[in-house]
Image: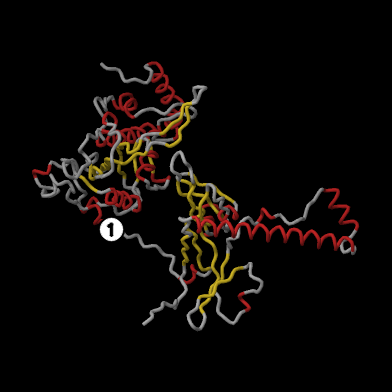
Amino acid sequence: MVQTKKMTLLPDILVLNCSLLREEDMQFWKVQNELFQKQMEQKAASDSQQRASFKERGTTSDAWNVFVEKEGLDFSFDKSSTTSWLPHHLFMALGGDGELVVKSYNDDDDPRNNDLEYIEYELFATVAHIDDPRTGGNLVAHVNVGEKYHQRKEGVTHTQWYLFNDFQISAVDKEDSVTFDLKWKIPCILVYKRLDVNTRNSLKIDFPLTSDILLPTPSISKRRRNLEPMSPGSSMTFTPLMPDELPTCEGVLVALDAEFVTLKAEEAELHSDGTRSTIKPSHLLAARITVVRGEGANEGVPFIDDYISTQEQVVDYLTKFSGIKPGDLDASVSSKHLATLKLTYCKLRYLIQCGCIIVGHGLSKDFKVINIYVPEKQIRDTVHLFHMPRKRFISLRFLSWYFLCEKIQKDMHDSIEDARTALKLYKKYLELTKDETEMTDFRQNVLKQLYAEGRRLEWKVPED
């Protein structure tokens, strides 16, 4: 008995695996590229002959020809404007026997004039692997970002292709998304979507997290697993939020600090002229994430202090700067309150969704390593608040000594201490900039005195 599968419904999103793992698969793409280039050359030759024929028959006016020659205009077919055999649009239909029929704009007949009910698909994204023998290469994505984003960002309704390469995002031409040089750029995935996908589906996104994500959870460390989060023997370094402390409106103040460890060391190249270039930056991992209350009776008391469990090999614990020691992130031996990065990430994501104001020092690095987006209006970064244009950024340790008369980070960094200090500095900033007059004085005098003192001390906190 032979079993067969027949498609009964066309998908909203069509994801195609290019599967170029074998040489014969690569050969298929190479042949398609060659056939496409020949087709383009033939079209260019045909267009050229047609224009010559028009000119001989006097189809175009003498005045037009004189104008074209004078201005140096060239209306010849530019094969570079279409650089790939991959279509940006596809038409798909199901035959009466369940047979899948696929056509493109390049076909001679218009599929829409056919008896079958064709569904039009548009190329939405492509993923490619960039081959680099030095680093092993990396994945990049081309994405056609839709109208809603540009309407919200720029107030203009249009679409635009973007290249996503790690943290680099840049606008690119439409043809770049389907241009693949198999010597160094290998196509991996093609994503097509129905043109009517937005009208067929609800675009409303329901936030999946609730305040339950902030409830106390047991540590995944074996040494602490049997201890209740709030039990006397648990030696908790934080106090979870009480029900009346949960954020219920926007603007709730919290302070955040994160410590990191190095999973992969930086790869750099030293040139003969003495210059140094980075081949591959170091790979950092969030090892401890702390969030403290920014207001209320328990101001400054942490309600999140999670050490992030990892099974990856840590190259450098950066103990002097992170306070993290070997074994702290190992679930089998750690005495710390261990959590997964996903759980802690969800806690932060909920706070951001609630509209909490995040206070910290050097938050851009924290957010980048944690890989989380925070709207600019919800960030209060003291490294920028106490900064003059075109001047150096000032360390948290120096600012704490100068404005708060407190010495921190004596032996090593501690995320609770750093978060509390950033919060105090932010409150000090608010105190120094209560109105427009004091803001002017802060910018013109306070900051100048700060930088003058820093230069005098070479930005080092006095020992005595």
Q: Check disc 1: other Cα within 10 Å, few if <14, some if 14-19, many if 20+.
A: few
Q: Residue at x 23, y 47 (%)?
A: 339
Residue nearest the viewer, comparing 57 with 32? 32
Residue at x 47%, y 72% (from the top left corner) = 200
Q: Position of residue 372 (x, y in %)?
A: 37, 47
Chosen colour scheme = secondary structure
Residue 198 as seen in the image, left or right of residue 282: right
- Closer to the camera, 238 or 29? 29
From the top left corner, tell me how far across and down residue 268 is, in percent.
43, 31
SS class of the residue under badge 1?
loop
Vertically, is 267 above or below 69? above
Q: Nearer the viewer, residue 100 or 182?
A: 182
Q: Quadrant of the C terminus?
A: top left
From the viewer's perspective, tell me whether residue 260 is left or right of residue 374.
left
Amino acid identity at mark 1: Thr
Number of marks: 1
Residue 208 in the image: above or below residue 197: above
Q: Position of residue 251 (x, y in %)?
A: 35, 48
Percent across and percent down for residue 105 are 62, 68
For the N terminus, the quadrant is bottom left
Residue linked to disc 1: 210
Q: Quadrant of residue 204?
A: bottom left
Does 15 appear above or below 239? below
